[in-house]
Amino acid sequence: MTTPASRHPAVRMGLSVAVATGLYGISFGALSVAAGFDVLQTMALSVLMFTGGSQFAFIGVVAGGGGGGAATGAASLLGVRNAVYGMQMNAMLRPGPLLRPWAAQVTIDESAATAASQAEPYGRRLGFWTAGLGVWVLWSALTLVGALAGNALGDPTAWGLDGAATAAMLGLLWPRLRSGDAWALAVTAALVTLVALPLLPSGIPILVAALVAGLWGWFRPAAATDAEAGAA
Amino acid sequence: MSWWSWILLASAIAFMTKLVGYLLPIRWLEDERLLRTANAVTIGLLAALVVMNAAGSGAGLALDSRLGALVAAAVALLLRAPFLVVVLVGAAAAAGLRLLGFP
C-alpha cells in the first residue's frame, strides 16, 4: 500500500458527508423535544433507529397528535427504502456474516450514496464505512446538542420550531422530485392527506397516502415512463 | 404501550428492515417493479408528512404561520440552499409571522 487509506478521496468525501449530515442532527434533537420526547428518548431514536427520514416521521406524527402505532407505522414504511440500499450494498461490498449487522445499522441514504459514487471496490468500502460510521457518531452527538438546546428554548412555537419541522419535511422530499412523475405522485399523496386529515384519526392519513403511493408505484406501467422520456 | 416501547419497537423494525436487504437475493435488485414501489412509497409518505406538518392540527386542519414557513422553505430550496439553512428559514418565517400577529 503506497497511499494511506486516510488520504483516499472516498474517505474525504465520507467525512464531508458526515459533517454536513451530522449538522441536521441539531434540528432533529430540537424538534424531538419540542414534540414532547425527553433527551434520552431523543438520543435513543438517533442511536438506535438511525435513519433520519423515519426519525423525523416518528416525531412528526406524534407532534401532529398521532399515537405510537401510527408513528411506528409511518417510520417503518419510510424505512423500506433502506432494504433496497441494503441489497445494493450487499451486492457492492459483500460484507461477511459478522460484519453484516454493523453494515446494516449504518446503511442509510448517505452511506449508500457515498459508496455508489466510488468507481472501485476498495473506494466503495472505504466510502461506505467512513460515511456510515461518521454520520452515526456526529448525528448522535449533535442530536444531543439539539435536544439540550431545544429544552432550553422553552415554547417551541414562539421560536418557529413547528415551521422548522415543516421545512425539514419539504427538505427531505425535495431531492426526490426529479421527474414529472415524482411531482405528480407527491401532489396526489399531498391531496389524499389533505382530504383524509379531517376524516380519519391522527396519523392514519399518512398511512393512507403511503398505500396510495405504493399502489401507484406497483400498477403504473413502466412503459409510460419510457414513452415520456422518448417523447421529450 | 409506553413511548419507550414504541421507540424500541420502531428502532428494531428499522434495523431489521436494513438487515433484510443484506439477506435478500441480489437478483431482486433487477425487479423494476419492486424498486419503483419502494421509491413511490418514500415519496408519498414524505409528501403526506409535509402536509401534516404544515396544516395538520390534531384530527383536522389549521391554517397558520406554518404555511408561511412552507412557502419560505420552498423558496430556499429553489435557491439551492443546504438542508440546515432550509430548516432555519422555515423557523424564522414561522416565528416572524407570529411576531406580526398571525396565528
Image (cartoon, rainbow, N blue to C red):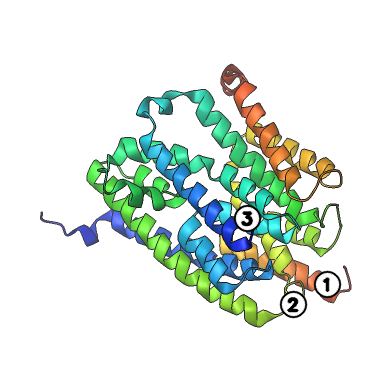
Name the residue located 28 percent from the left edge and 55 percent from the top edge: A9
Would residue A75 be found to the left or right of residue B75 on screen? left
Kindly identify the residue that appears in the image at 50 percent across and 56 percent down: A49
The quadrant the C terminus of chain A occupies is top right
Question: Does mark 3 fall on the same chain as mark 2?
Answer: yes
- Disc 1 sits on a residue from what chain? B
Answer whether residue B73 is visible to the viewer in this image. no
Image location (x, y in percent) of residue A166: 70, 58
Tell me the crowding category of disc 2: few under 14, some 14 to 19, or many 20 or more residues within 10 angstroms, Cα based.
few
Q: Amino acid at mark 2?
A: Asp
Looking at the rendered structure, the kind of residue marked 3 is Phe
Q: Residue at x 81, y 57 (%)?
A: B58
**Left or right of residue B1, residue A109 in this image:** left
Whole-angstrom CA distance, mark 2 to mark 1, is 13 Å
Note whether A232 is above or below A80 in the view shown.
above
Left or right: A220, with B98 as reference point = left
Secondary structure under badge 3?
Answer: helix
The residue identified by callout 2 is A155
Assess whether mark 1 and mark 3 are in contact (beta carbons under 8 angstroms): no
Tag on residue B62?
none
Residue A62's quadrant in the figure?
bottom right
Mark 1 — residue?
Answer: B98
Distance from disc 2 to disc 3, alpha carbons, whole Å, reads 21 Å
